Image (cartoon, rainbow, N blue to C red):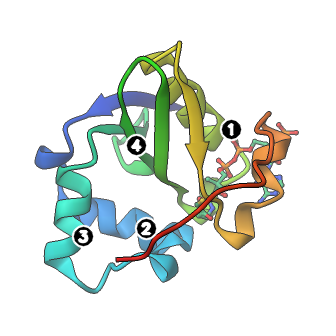
Amino acid sequence: MSFKIDRADGATLDLDEVLAVYHASGLGERRPVADRERFAAMIRNAGLVLTARDEDDGRLLGIVRAVSDFAYVTYVSDIAVVRERQRSGIGRALIDATRDQAPSAKLVLLSAPAATGYYPHIGFTPHTSAWVLNP
Ligand SMILES: CC(C)(COP(=O)(O)OP(=O)(O)OC[C@H]1O[C@@H](n2cnc3c(N)ncnc32)[C@H](O)[C@@H]1OP(=O)(O)O)[C@@H](O)C(=O)NCCC(=O)NCCS
């Protein structure tokens, strides 16, 4: 049950395959998955996309979408791992691979409520002044 992490071009990923991971991870409940056009733009324009695939059959098991200047900061927009493969190291490997893409950049993200215990567990520190201006 090993997996492989690769950088991907969001524009060429199969949208249904990506949608399946959002649904199967639970993150689909918190993202505009019903608006196919908007979701496609989220994947296409993400800037930095990494995938985790089953090494045997190539199935998409996890994904991270981020925006980076590759020098100072990488903003992680989404990270998702399919439920049946959660807690087997894929999330941590996706975060490590994201850091490897821009080693001098710090990672910044807004946690989903279900994942607030996760980030401190893998080394993130909380920030008390995150601010959001909704569209
Ligand atoms: C959050 C998520 C990406 C974590 O990925 P994962 O592959 O399950 O995590 P890992 O296997 O890399 O876990 C690494 C460690 O964190 C722990 N961990 C995993 N999820 C955790 C959680 N929700 N709370 C606390 N610890 C957690 C694991 O037990 C593991 O601990 P260990 O190293 O001591 O064995 C995944 O659970 C997920 O997709 N959740 C649903 C979508 C979501 O909420 N995404 C976050 C959006 S901000």
In the picture shown, does residue 51 fall above or below 25? above
Residue occupying image coordinates x 76% and y 38%: 124
Residue occupying image coordinates x 32% and y 29%: 7
Task: Report which quarter residue 39 is drawn in.
Answer: bottom left
CB-based contact (under 8 Å), mark 3 and mark 4: no
Q: Where is the C terminus found, in terms of image quarters?
A: bottom left
Query: Residue type at mark 4?
Result: Ala
Query: Which residue is denoted by mark 4 in the rendering?
Result: 66
Instruction: Give left or right: position of 103 versus 101.
Output: right
Q: Residue 89 got which mark? A: 1
Task: Report which quarter residue 19 is drawn in.
Answer: bottom left
In the picture shown, does residue 74 fall above or below 40? above
Q: Earlier in the sequence, mark 2 or mark 1?
A: 2
Q: Which label lies toward us, 2 or 4?
A: 4
- Which structural element holds mark 4? strand
x and y percent of residue 110 in the render? 60, 58
Mark 1 residue CB less than 8 A from any atom of ligand 1: yes
Packing grade of label 4 (10 A; few <14, some 14-19, many >=20) is: many
